[in-house]
Structure formats: structure tokens, C-alpha cells
Amino acid sequence: MATGQSLVLCDLRQEAPLALSVFIGQCAERLHAGERLLALFGRSEEGGGIRATAVFHSPEIPARLTVLRGQAKAGEHYPSLTVEHPAAQSLEREFWEQTGLHPDGHPWLKPIRFEGARQQQMGEYPFFRVRGQEVHEVGVGPIHASVIEPGHFRFMCLGEKVHHLEIQLGYQHRGVEALLLGRSPWSLTPLVESICGDSSIAYAWGHCAAIEALADMPGGLETDLLRGVALEMERIAIHIATLNGLATDIAFLQGGGTYGRLRTAIINATQRLCGNRFGRGWLRPGRSRGLAAAQREELLKTLRDFAQDFAGINELMLASHSVRARFQGTGTVSETAAREIGLVGLVARASGIAIDARSQLPGRLYDRHPLPMLTESGGDCWARMSLRMREVEASLNWLCALLGDATLDLSTRHAQHAQPSTTPPALRPHSLCVSLVEGTRGPVIQALETSAEGQLLHYKVQDPSMPNWFGLALAVRENEISDFPICNKSFDLSYCGNDL
Amino acid sequence: MFKSISVRRSQGSQYIPDPRQAQPAGFRGKPLIGEAACAAGCGRCQEVCPSRAITLSPVQIDLGRCVLCGDCELACPSGKIGFDNDFKLAATEREGLLISAARPHIDPVKVSAELHKRFGRSLKLRSVSAGGCNACEMEINALGNVNFDIGRYGIDIVASPRHADGLVLSGPISRNMTAALQICWDAMPAPKLVIAVGACAISGGVFADSEGVDRRFLETVKPTLYVPGCPAHPLSFISGILDLLGISS
């Protein structure tokens, strides 16, 4: 295993899973020691038991991913981790919803997405109630006014002021994890690209890396470089879509017009490289789609032209008093709160927490071609907006440096596995592979477990949005209800990534 | 002030003058199925297809299911399948989306005189995502940007179903959205129509086999226009709707 690798492969043949109480005890110890719980999930075993998995990010140097495994009887109870570590709240809720294992004392035990037998029971969500003579509730959704995914927001207000927002998701649940077990692991990528369609590249990369690790056919540095290029193109495109939305939501029309046009330039460049504006078909396990010299030159020119216009509109937006008036001090999540509730990705960085897998688990690619760790301290809509601008600039600089470096060959002439093989290799039996890719919103985690025959036994997907939705609920507290749209847009979380 | 003018100057004029004549460079659009004979017993294209869009002997691709991933092209040992950048993929009949060597083109969208009269100068649409992955939704949003600018043809996305003439459906219809979708449809005043956008809405796409999907809504309501793709390209949407309503570009 390379230093700081964002992938871990476990041999499960000699595995001795811990009893549930010991497993949870060790999880609590790690949380006390400052480790971050990235994922907590389980699958049913033959005979009715549950095999549980927890993935931690250890802060020691070098940072790494560690995996804990546990075993439980169906319906078992355990002391909830959330009581002392609120960051575990969404993970424990999902763990309960998917396995039936009950976290005793969990303060907010409600379904994450209404899956399995709970489907179509959306009307039975146990909303928190704020009581009081002048308290009123405002319900919005699942269908919203603009073109956006469905979700229900319930505001508990006193006049214009929001005391609390409760977010009910699950409307987008379409059974992704079950479908991922229904096909050959080598032809899953188009489905993986549709788990969260605006993060196709982040998902496809994590998927390809896991399949390749399980098949003992790791790609070369060149493959990583090409995938890294694809990922930063996606980050630029999605951050700009968010900036466009932020500008439109406060009627800063020049921003809306300009960011919209700039995004088109980026996604059309992506289409020229791989046939699709969202990067679909670009990444496949065991294969690299190279950049011919002419394509590389054209992409470089697109990015340089883009950089100039992007800087211009950013300057205008940042200097505008009306933009400042709406965004500064609106929707603030303090660093303490962000840490406590376990925010990840961009929204955590906007609250001053330095977490980014590209820097902390760099692996081969980012060891040689590092990206800076960017943070903002404000934790408000302004911080989240400015950080998106700075992240786009960093991605642009990184891409231009890479594409302009004549010593780097990106044509896949030397790629170890440029040719698709007709008979795909078997996957390692009795193995668990966890991959992590820092997508636009944060870490995209995928965990694949194989059976004794090398078949996929479990495929767990976790979008960075799942732990972050609660951050949005905290951000709007004590804000005016009319500021909700900009708070929501500044987070720009995924519904389908949460709902699976 | 000067900065604003300079940004505006740099923006220039970005609209696509005639969307029907656009040439989206690199777009993997309409499948091309050649006359080359398949190797005996070969079904590689069908094996790799993520959405059961391909049937064999003869090879036929259902664009209502196809996600345009291009994996069949790479898998085919005989070079029988390819794609070009033709974005005119929309059809008014579900069967019109089948492509084979003998039938290389999609049935062109027929102008409806009735729809032209009623909505040719103004069509208001309500978007409902029912299990969509946010790619079709982002492309539907892009219809209104300065490049595609669908508003110039009198076509707009509106906030309320009460104001809408048509429902733009994206996603495979997740079970958890069936009730909300029905309520939205019932709230729209007649006459009204449905536009199915993307492989998911047309056939379920890569999610067609999922237990989390319930497509019975489309047993009672037949879409007036099918816009294939994964996601559907804005040009496919615009050219399809302009053809349907008989709007010149």
C-alpha cells in the first residue's frame, strides 16, 4: 500500500469479526482519539446475521484508511455513538435503516431515505415539532419551484425567523446498491456514473480503482493523470453551476449570464474529449482514454481563455455591495459546529476545517502533482462562494501546469492496460476494497466486498452529501426564511447521492 | 462600471443562432449500425450494454433505453457499431426510437397542427425529477442559459403546475416520488402534455430493473415527445420541441 493512498484492500480470509459490542466499543475509542468515521454499514449474511464494516480516516502521519469489521445478530441493540459523537448521526441512521441494528439513545433516529419496506411511506416522517403560540411551520417540496431534484423542507419559524429546518429526503431512492450486484462487475460503470450524475467522474474513478485493485491490475501513473484531469474538469463545471445558481438567486444577472456561458465552454470541452458533457464514458476499469497532442493543445487553450473571463466575473461579483449584503453573515456554520456534526468536503473547508483527500491521502498522483489545501474561515454563504471560486482557480492552475508539461505523456501510448481485454480477469475472492475520491462536494466512498467465488457480495456507496445535509439545517437557524434559497445553493448538496 | 462593461464585452454574443443546425463537436449521439456481419455466436455488445438496449439478429438499438455510453462500440469485435454527433434523437412514438442497419434513422418528429395552434407561440413547462441523477435536470436548466436560450421561442420553465401546459419528466420514476408526480400532474390544467426526457424517463434506463422504480404513471399518461440521451442533450430537446410545435428557427 502506497503512502497516503485513498484506497484500502483487505484480505478477509483470516478475518475474525468482532462481536457488535466490541466493534462499537472500538469505534468509540477511535472517535475519542480524534479519528474520523467515514462510513458505517452492514450487510445481511446467510443465517440471519449482520456483518458490519466501519471505515476510519486516521489523522496520524502518514494518514491512511483503516477498516474495522464486526458481526451482529439480527435486531441487536447497541449504545449509540451519536450520543457522544454527533458526527456519527447520519451514518448510524443509515446503518439502522439498512440492517435493523438499533442504536440505543440515538437522539434523531429517523429514516435517511425510506428504502426497502419503508418505500412510499414518505408521509409518515416523524418531524420535530416546535411548539408555541406564534410558531408556524412552512413545508416546501418535494417538488420545488425551479428545475431541481425533489426533497421536502419543513421550516419551523417565528415570524420570518427560522428556528429549525428539518430536511426529509428519499424521494430519489431508486435502489442503486441492489442494482450494483446484478451485473458483471466489469460493465457497471455506466450505472455508477448515474448514481450522482453531476459527479460521474468522481464516482467512476473510485469504482475503476476498486475494481482494478480487486483484479490485481493497477493502472500506471499515466492512468491516474488522465483521471485526475477528468476530475478537475468536473470540479470546475459543477462549482461554476453553483456560482451561476448563487448569482441568479440574488438577481445578480451578469453573474448568471456569464457563469452559464463559462460552464458551457468547460462541459463542451469535456464532450470533445469523451463524447459526453458530463464525462460519461470517459473512465472505465482497466482502460485509459488518452489525450492526443491536438486535443491537449485545444484543451489548454480553452482553459486559458476560460481563466481570464472567470477572473473578470469573479472580481465583479466579489466587489458588488449587493452580493456582499446578501451573502456575508448569512447561513453561518461555525468551525466548532462543523466539526461536531462531521461536515466533509467543501462546506467543511468553508468553515475552516482543513480536510481534503487530495492533500491528506494523496497517493501516487497528488504526491507528485499536489493541489493546495484551501480553506475559508467565515462558514457563511460568502465563504462557500469564495471557496468555490478559489477551488476553480486552483484546479485551472493544476490542469494548465499538467497539460503544459511536455515531459508528461498523456497519450496512453505507454499505459499498462490501454487495450480492453475480451475476458475480464476474475476479482480476488474474500476481499474488501474501499476507495475514496475527493469529488466536487467531498469524499465519494465506495466499498466492494467479494464472496469466496470472487463475486460481488456487497457494494456500499456513500456520497459526501449524506453527512452534510444536517449542516444546511444548522446553517439556516436564526436566519430569515427568505435566505434559505441562497443557503441551500451555497451548500449545493446532492439529493440522488443521498437517496441512492 | 468599466469592469462590468469589460466583462460584458468579453461575453460577446453567445446564443446559438439556429439550434437545428448546430454541430456539437465530439457528441456521442445517434448510433450507427453497419452492414458488417457479426461473428458467429457473438453477443458482446448485448453483454456490455448497461440498459438492455440491444437486441441481436439483426442488431438493433433502442434509443429509448440506450444511454449512449459507447461501450458496445468498444466491445464489438466486428466494428459494426459506431456513433455520430447527430443530436436529433427525439421522436413522438416510442417505436420510432429503434435503430438497425435496415432502419438507420429515427422517425422524424411530426409537426402537430393542433399543438402548433395551441402552443406554437407559448409553451409553459413544469419540470419534475422522479429519481433523476441531476444530469438531465442540469441539462433542462441549461435550456434557459445564454447559449440555448429556449425562451426566445416562447418556451419557458414555470414554478407552478397551475401555470404549466406540459410536464417535463426526468428520472425512472422512483417509488417514493409516484404520489408527488401524480399530484403535480393532476394539478395541471388541461390541455396538457408530457415530455419524457432521458433514457430513465423513457424506459427506466439503467434503473429499469430496480424494485425502487414504479412506472405505472406512464401506463395512464402517454408522452407526446420522447427525448433520448443520458443525459438528454439540450439540442436534442430544443430541436425535438421546435419540430413538434412547428416553430421555425
Image (cartoon, rainbow, N blue to C red):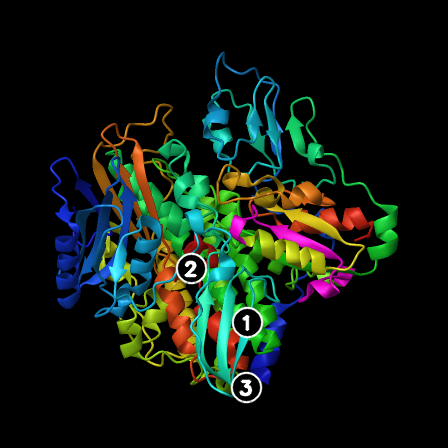
What is the three-letter code of the residue carrying label 1?
Gly
Residue at the image position 39 percent from the left and 80 percent from the top: A332
Depicted A412 relative to depicted A347: above or below: above
Name the N-terminal-most of marks 2 and 3.
Answer: 2
Q: Is residue A218 visible?
A: no
* Badge 2 amino acid: Arg
Q: Is residue A444 left or right of residue A37?
A: right
Mark in the foreground, 1 or 3: 1
Secondary structure type for disc 3: helix
**Residue drawn at point x = 41 percent, y = 50 percent:** A201
The alpha-carbon separation of the residues under discs 1 and 2 comes to: 32 Å
- Residue B146 position by quadrant: bottom right
Task: Pick whichever of labels 1 and 3 is earlier in the sequence.
Answer: 1
The residue that mark 3 highlights is A322
Which portion, as a residue range, is magenta? Answer: B152-176
Q: CA distance from mark 1 to mark 3?
A: 29 Å
CB under 8 Å between discs 2 and 3: no
Which residue is at the front of the view, A338 or B216? B216
**How far apart are the two marked residues, 2 and 3, measured between alpha carbons?**
27 Å
Q: Circle 1 — which element?
A: strand
Amino acid on which the number 3 mark rests in the picture? Ser
- Residue denoted by label 1: A139
Which percent across, then down, holds residue A127? 45, 69
x then y, percent, for residue A77: 23, 55
Residue at label 2?
A235
Q: Is B156 a magenta residue?
A: yes
* Mark found first going from the N terminus, 1 or 2: 1
**Which mark is nearer the camera, 1 or 2?**
1
